[in-house]
Amino acid sequence: MRILKTLFSRKMLLRGWLPLTLAGAGLLAWFIHDSISELDYRMIEQRSRVLYARDGAVLGYSLSSDNDSYRFYTKEEEVSPLYLKMLLASEDRNFYQHSGVDFLSLVRALSDNVASGRITSGGSTLAMQVVKRLTGHKRTYVNKLKEIVQAIYITRKFGRKQVLEWYLTLAPFGGNVEGVKAASLRWFNHLPDKMTPAEAALLTALPRAPEHIRPDRNYQAAVYYINDVLKSAYNRGVLDNDLWRATLEDDIPVRLHAINQEARTLATYVFQNHPGTDIETWVDPKVQKILHNEARNFHEIHQDGAVLSAVVLDAATHRITGILGSSDLRISQMCLPFARRSPGSALKPFAYALAFQNGRLHPGTILHDNSRIYGYWKPSNFTNLFTGKITAARALTMSLNLPAIEVLELTGPSYFVNAVNRGQKRLFLKDNTADYSVILGSGSISLMDLTELYAMLNEDGVMEHYALLRDEAGEPAYRMLSRESARAVFNILKTARRPPNGIHMTEVSYKTGTSGKFVDALALGSMDNYTVGVAIRFPGNRAGYYQYSGFQDAAPALFSIFNGLKTLGTETMVKDDIESELLRDAVPEALREIVEEKKVIDKKTLRIDFPASGDTILPDGSGLVFIRHSGGSGKVYFTVNNEQTEQNYFKPEHEGYYSVSILDDEGRSDRVTFKVVLDEESDNGNEAPPEN
């Protein structure tokens, strides 16, 4: 007792033990601080950027910025519960009990290592495996001590859920594949929320020795480790006996899969314009599949450098549910729906709507399709023909240029441009100068903005914000057009001529457009809650060997997409009945005809009364098709498929589309295109000739 008192006397402590204690404490503090300072979180920060569809499917991605790895952040709830149970049973049984380090497992591992004379077992917890990834430590006893400190630190600081998600994100799975989500997509070609027991076992085993266990390089080793994990899962009650035995016979993958990149152009656009590593969108994979199928169909027919792009908007949710950025990434990797291009004639409906709204025009008002000179500019129609007097409704469905300019005169180009740009600038003009050519496509606008304008018509004049990103703040809606004027234009466009694959789709309200030199061909329209915009473009602004047009090429793609959307189910847009003279056939006397002295008014309009454009007809009993016309003066000449005749009839030699033009002595003309079938059951024929 006297000896102990002597040893622990204050004097002896001050002389010996206390300095040693303080020195040890200081050394320990330094070691802890040094260990913690080694943690480098850049692997997490520099992970892949991923663009997700609304159901969690990967639309596009970038590789990690540090070493070009597939490193997708993986959340606990995104992973199969079976995999998590198997992982913890095999790698960290006490994960939810210890503070980052399982000291019993460490003692057991140390005993095994001493017995074997080398490091054979690490006893590492998931937290310790995470810090090893963050630090890049090699296997030494000193580093193991550091990992103990680091594992306790990150568990205390960030919590077990974060530690687990970091493991799910950083664990190596062979080659440049890191993290469970990327591994599941690369090895199994599906997301990790649903895994078979064999798949879960493979992803549990791979991080132990990724290059050695890779099934594409060492199949036997992969089988051995999978069976080892399955046995452990059975012994610890994760699998019952029958499932364990059955799983032993399951196939395992022998190659890596490519991860979907069909929406790569959209991903690139979003990454460039929005911050954040992982970005969730409202894009519907089922809608995307329809668009990509249409892209493949397009390139099976056309291989001349043109690309197809498309947008799908859903008025039921006010979300962008589909975007086809570029149908061929070899030609263009731009997300073309966001690029500004010429709209051709696609803006004409909004000039008519503004004139309706201002009380200057009625759908039945007579307009004048006559050649006129505007300064040094002499516009013409797409067909280079003129029809004389024509109602506003028919002029719009036929997309005639001269009547559209006449309508624009009622409000003025500047008023038109300001109305289109209300809320945000959509339409861009050369030198910021508005003139009459804007209605024929001299300005530029993106397909996305143009499609939203057509969605506004579908919503009776209310401009809504259509969201692409899930966390996107919605902008307030506003009224761009009166209900009456928007509904009048919408109804008129429902009567527009259909392409062959859309003849029976009378519910679609749509318009086409073709830019100068056939560089851009567009079609936009609405069916129930969907509004779709389609563009066929030469990205380099060069004219194609084949002349694309809105009606001939873009319209069939539009209706094909609508047919696909029908299979998903559409929500009927319930629209209230509107009482308005714009929606009645009777034309107010003051709006019966646009008359100005400076205009040339044709009193003898030449018109083909039968057949009408878009008709499908049978020849009479003699096998002849008769053309009935009215108006004109002097002798009338007939042209059937570019062959001129003085007879008002012809005998079709084959089924298909026929184009008939008439011309009188004073230069008046009209043209129709219709389909002739020789048998009532037949519905085959040639493609319709191009129209605007």
Image (cartoon, helix red, strand yellow):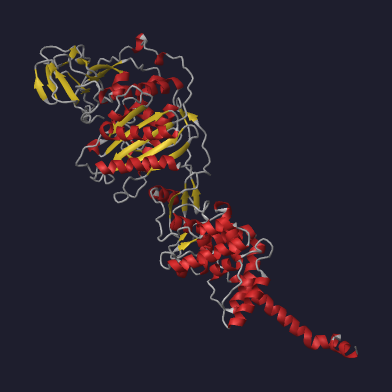
Name the quadrant of the N terminus.
Answer: bottom right
Question: Which residue corresponds to the image point at 64% horizontal and 76% vertical from the top-left?
Answer: 31
Question: Which residue corresponds to the image point at 58% horizontal and 53% vertical from the top-left?
Answer: 81
Vertical placement of residue 367 versus 98, above or below: above
Vertical placement of residue 64 versus 56, above or below: below
Residue 500 coordinates in the image, percent (x, y)? 28, 28
Q: Is residue 469 visible?
A: yes
Tell me where residue 437 sits by quadrant. Answer: top left
Name the quadrant of the C terminus.
Answer: top left
Judge left or right: residue 660 versus residue 62. left
Q: Is residue 435 visible?
A: no
Query: Foreground residue, 474 or 528?
Result: 528
Query: Foreground residue, 277 or 229?
Result: 229
Query: Foreground residue, 526 or 617?
Result: 617
Query: Foreground residue, 290 or 225?
Result: 225
The total number of labels drawn is: 0
Vertical placement of residue 46 versus 682, above or below: below
Question: Which residue corresponds to the image point at 42% horizontal and 49% vertical from the top-left?
Answer: 267
Residue 281 coordinates in the image, percent (x, y)? 48, 44
Tell me where residue 312 sits by quadrant. Answer: top left
Residue at far right of view: 2
Tell me where residue 590 sits by quadrant. Answer: top left
Residue 646 coordinates in the image, percent (x, y)? 9, 16
Residue 216 coordinates in the image, percent (x, y)? 41, 64
Vertical placement of residue 575 versus 199, above or below: above
